[in-house]
Image (spheres, helix red, strand yellow):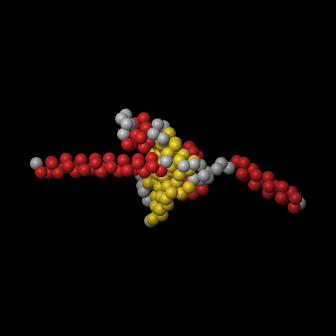
Amino acid sequence: MKKLNIIIFVFVFASIQLFSQPFSIENVFDKYSGKKDFTSVNLTDPASMFMAENALKMSVEGVKGLKILKFDHKKGTNAKDGKEFLNDLQKMNKLEGYKEFLSVVEDGKNVKIMFKPVGNDISEFITAVANEADESVLIWINGSLNMNDLMNFGKTVIQQEKGSKSGKDNKKEKKDSE
C-alpha cells in the first residue's frame, strides 16, 4: 500500500510539473492583451519612428520590440483580471534569467526594473509598476541593448521634455507680457 501511495504521489507531482507553464513575460502579455479595460501597445521597430539620424534614433536602434500593458484600477470595471494582473506584476522577481536593477516599495506601490544580461549587453529590459490605487503598468523592451544606450535614451527624452516645457513657458510669458 505504501508503494502505491508513493507511486501515485510521484505521478501526480510529475503531471503538475509537465502541465504547468513557467512564469514568463510573454505569458503575461498573452494573458491580458485585448482584454476589457486593458491598454496594450506593441511596437515592433521603434527606430523606424525617427526619420532623421539623431540621438534618440541612435539610442533605440538596438531595440527590436517594445510592449506596454496597462490597467487603470480607478476606471476599470474588470476588477478580477485587474487584480490578477497586479498579482502577476508582483511576481516579476520569479522571472528566470533576469537581474534586478531597481526595486521601490512605497505606500502600496511596487516598482521593479529588471534586465536580462547576455554577455556585456542586455537582451530584455522590464519595468513593472504595481499600484492598486491607480494604474498598473508593464513595459517590456527587447533587442540588443547596453546600459549606455539606455542612459542616452533617458537623457535625450529628459532633455527634449525640458526643451518642450521651456518652449511652452516662453510662449506663455510672451502672451502674458502682451
Q: What's the residue at 84%, 59% (across, down)?
A: 5
Q: Residue furthest front?
A: 120
Q: Nearer the viewer, residue 70 or 172?
A: 172
Residue 175 vs 4, above or below: the answer is above
Q: Position of residue 80 (x, y in %)?
A: 53, 53
Q: Examine the rendering and report whether any part of residue 19 can be seen.
A: yes
Judge from the rendering whether residue 104 lies leftward or rightward of residue 117; answer left or right: left
Q: Nearer the viewer, residue 48 or 134?
A: 48
Q: Nearer the viewer, residue 169 or 14?
A: 169
Most extreme residue toward the left is 178
Residue 37 higher or lower than 132, as above or below: above
- The residue lying at 14 percent from left, 51 percent from top is 176
Horizontal and vertical percent for residue 166?
Answer: 25, 50
Q: Residue at x 48, y 63 (%)?
A: 105
Residue 80 in view: no
Which residue is drawn at the image coordinates 87% and 61% (left, top)? 2
